[in-house]
Structure formats: structure tokens, C-alpha cells
Image (spheres, rainbow, N blue to C red):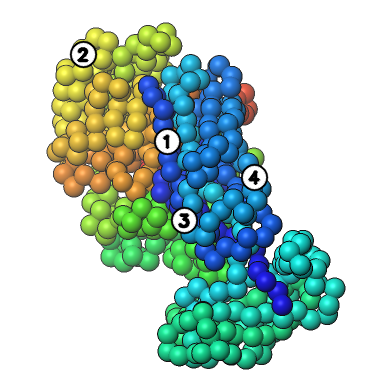
Amino acid sequence: MVDYYLQTDSYAANNDYSFGAPINDPWFAKRMLAIGSEATEILNFDLNNLVVQGSVQIEMNIWGGTDYLQSPDHHVIYSLNNNALDDFWFDGIVSDIRQYDIDSSKFNNGQQSIKVSVPNDTNTAADVIHIESWKVTYPRAFVLNNKQLDFDSVIATTNNGADTIFANGFENAINNFRVSNANNETYVIYQENSEGQIAAVTSLQSGNCGVSSSSDCQINFSLENVAAHVYISAESEIKTPEFSLPVILTDINQGSANYLIISHPDFIGQELDQFISLKQQNFVVKVVDVEQIYAQYGFGNVSAASIAQYIRFAQQSMAVENVLLVGGDTYDYKNYLGLNSVSFIPTLYGSTDDLITFAPIDAKYADTDGDNIPDINIGRFPVRTVAELANLTLKISNYSNKTYAKTAVFAADKFDISNAYSFKADAEALIALLPQQWQDNIGVNNRAFVDDDGVALAKTKLTDNINQGIALTSFIGHSGPRDWSFSRMFSASDANALINSDSPTLVTQWGCWNTYFVSPTEDTMAHAFMLNQNGGAASVLGASTLTKAEHEKGLAQLVLTFLTHDEMTLGDAVTQAKRIYAQTNPDARDVILGWNILGDPSLRL
């Protein structure tokens, strides 16, 4: 009789998200910050129906969240049930996985605890540790849990108290099993071998079996001594699959078009038709329901990879030059946070430098040959409702017919003392690149420079220019998802208060994170400009990642030259600028991949 199996319990709660995770999963269980004092966390786990034979294996999976010049910059202590387990140091933003084999006699059946301590003794500003997961493998008796059990059939067993693996009884061709805590229901048992073949297993019940589960009621069966996985369940606990209607396929692979719209079905209708009518004046437009792409390129599964595959096909076989994604996105598409944010059109994620590993990069869709350089133009409408789509379409129509061409307001963050960097100088350099007619229209009131004006006056200049009607609003400096400048010279709330619906602007942002369109908890500057019902912008360009000022400066000079001197569309200007900039700066993924068009790629400045 086989006495026990090895039960593995994994604890990997997805409680928080990091775009800088050094592993292949941006979600993690807990973040520990030791700053000024020690930080501790208690991780509980259960050893349920423990058999005291052999060892219990614990695997701890953490990663460092800071990387200082001082090495090592992380110190972690593990304690198990108030007994020292490990004390170690490591360095940088790296994963640290450690396994511990502990004699099972050290444990009692029931709840256990691991204490994780970060002592704050690294002599750095802070010590940040992310707990990714922990895993426990232990010898467990064959006891049903909620009328179900699954296990590997080739496991450790005992013979006269000696504990071994793949021995002691396994020389026999047949192994016998007895599983307790059953009831008088009908149970089914299936065995899946190493080749994925599944076979039913016959069983007999013994003992005192009533309506309630009891240790006196057992299920008895025998298995061949082969590697396999066993599934046991009461028939009442077997889940019934739900039937969903398949997508009725339409032909999305024929014809030619130079403007491809990929839309979530919620937005295919009258509001999108109005935008299509605008584009058909200059383009051959093709509209594709993203669910058709999932069905035909993703085996029915929602995936960004299937969208990328279809865009690659469309560029190569239908001569597509411009792609517009219609629908917003969120990194919490599995609703781990319980906020019910919706991913209408998923983006691709990738690394934009050594620190940011999960940046949302729509620009990668436009890279059809895999060299990280765009081959076609791409934009996105980050809308969540048809009302937002209708409003944005109206703004684009109004902007296309604007009477205030060749006007601009430039905003610059204050001088960065720590890096000795002048954003005002960058702004003046961009203005100097513009055609003379543009420069003539940019006076002192069109220069919102914190160095010269202070925050209040700079904000007033921005607001007044945009509300009066201005073709281009350009910001240079530090930024976050909802703010320009650490001093908040302009914020998402300011953008939401704009009242220029009849004379929308176009915004270029030369700073970090301002088009981070996948946040499930907040709208970015771009959302505020574009989705404001009373004003704002027809399209917004900016970064969805951390960027370097020098990279932003280099790309900005090219983009604005193409937009003003060559009067290119947004898409053509950005694509051409990235191609040229990548020739001398191939590693500048922060702007080549992380700088986006939220809006219409065919719009002209």
C-alpha cells in the first residue's frame, strides 16, 4: 500500500504590478520597503494531513527592487516557525530563488509561517524587496480535499520506516492506493500518462460511507507502476463546460487598403462610421473586428500576438501603410485588482531599457520585420465608450479644418540642477528648427517656461493659448502619467478643464510616462487631453515608458522638422524620424519603441 504522495502548494498571489520586474511575470505578491527601519512580512502556509516521512521542501522566490552603486544592496533574513532559516545578501534588480529541504519531523500538522525580514542595514537610501511567490512540497496522506484529489502516482513511500523515492515497493508491477475522506457519492478516477493519454480507473469504496465526507469512508484502487498523474473527483464536483457561440468568420484577408482600422466590436457602428467617412476622402480604409483576428489568427484566444501577425500580413499582402487601433487597454486584463478595467485592444509589452521590462509598446506592432524599427504607421484611440469615440472623431474633424495653422505654444520644465540640464534650451532649439512663419507666431506669450515665468504664469500661458486655439502644444521636461514637471506646471485635471472643443490642439510631449495608456487606476495626460468632452486635443504624442532627455531631444528635432517643413502626417513623421534616429542610436528603445501616437496617424499638423 502506498502511504503518501508529494503535495506541492504554490503561493503566488497577483496583488501588485511592476513594469520593471526582472523576471517574466510583472505581477507579484508583496512589496517590502525598508527605509529608516526594518521591514517584515509573515507568509503563512498549511501542511495539511502531513505524513512525517522524508523532508519538506520550501522554495522562496524574491527579487530586488533597487540597484545602488554600493554592492551588495539587499539583505534578507528568513525565519521558519520562529527558527532561523537563512540570512543572506545579494545585489541589484535580480531574481533570487532559494530552496530548503527540512526534515518533516520538524513540523506539526497545520499552519506554518515564514517570516521575511529586511533589516535596513545596507547603508543605502532604501532596500526594496519584492516577494514573487513561495512554494512548499511535502509528504501528504491520501485524503480527499473537498471531494477531490490529484497527485503523481510515482511518489515517495515507506518500507519499515525507511523513506526513499522511486523504490521500496515500486519494484512491483502494481501499486495499491487507499484514499480517505470520501462519502457515498459516485467517484471517478482518471490516469494521465506521460504521453498525455487518459484512461479511466476502476475503484471500490469501503468503510462507513454516508452523506457526509468521513475518514471512515475510503476509495480503493490499483495502478500500474508507471509515471502518471491521477485525478479523483466526486461526480458532483466535476465542472460542466459552458458553450459559447463561435465567431461567424468573415474574410479579413482579401483586398487592398492603405488605412487599416482594427476595432473592438463595441465601437463598430455609427460613431466609427463617421471617422471612416473622414478618412475615405484620402485613403482606402479597411475595418476589421478584432474578434475576427482572434478567431483566424489566434485560434479563438485573445492575444496581442495574433494582432501583430495580422498587421504583418496586412502590410505585406494588402499594402497597408497606416494602422489605427480603436479601444483602450489595461495591464490588469485578468482583473487581479478587482477594478473591472477592460482591455479592448491589447498592446504588446517589452523592454525599453535596462530598467523597464514591461512597457506597453504599440510601436512594436508597426515593426513587421522584427528589427524594432517601424515599417508602417500606427496610432490608437484609447476610448472606452462610444461617446468618447464620437467626441474624438469630432475633434479630429475640427482640427483638420482649423483656421489657426502654424501656431504653437511651447512649455519647458525648470532647469534640472541635479543633471545640469536645461529644458528651456531644448525648447528654444526646437523653435529655432521651425519654418520662419511658425517662428514668427511664437512670441513671449507662446513660451511657457518655468525658468522665466514660474509655475503659475506658465500654466496660465498654456491654458490661455490652448483655449484660444493653437495648432501645436509641445512640452519638454520631466513628466509622469498625470503631470508635466515635478512642480505640476500642468496636470490631467488642468487638461480636463480646457474648453476648446471647437478648436482642439495637437500635443507632443517630450518627457516620461505621459501616454502610459494601460493603467487600470488612472487616466494619463493623454487621456485627459483626448477624452475631455469640452476641449483638449485631437491627438497626443508621447512616451509610455521611462525616457532619456537626450533621446527625446534627438527624436523631437526630427519629428518636428518632418511635421512642419515637410508637412508629413503624424504617422509618416514619427516613423521616418524613428528610422533615421535608429541608424545612429539603435539602442534608444525608450523612444523608438516607447514613444506613441494616441490618435489618428494620418492627421497633419
The residue sitting at 45% across, 51% down in the picture is 44
Give the numbered dot on residue 454. 2
The residue sitting at 21% across, 44% down in the picture is 532
> Which residue is nearer to you in this view: 137 or 291?
137
Q: Which residue is mark 4?
A: 99
Q: Is residue 348 left or right of residue 540?
A: right
Percent from the top left, x then y, of residue 189? 62, 83
Amino acid type, mark 3: Gln
Give the numbered dot on residue 40. 1
Q: CA distance from mark 1 to mark 3?
A: 19 Å
Q: Residues within 10 Å of mark 1 (few under 14, many from 20)?
A: some
> For the residue labelled by badge 2, is the local secondary structure a helix, a strand or a loop?
helix
Q: Which is closer to the viewer, label 1 or label 3?
A: 3
Q: Contact, CB < 8 Å: mark 4 with mark 1? A: no
Q: Which residue is mark 3?
A: 111
> For the residue labelled by badge 1, is the local secondary structure a helix, a strand or a loop?
strand
Q: Is residue 87 left or right of residue 34?
A: right
Q: Is residue 373 left or right of residue 440?
A: right
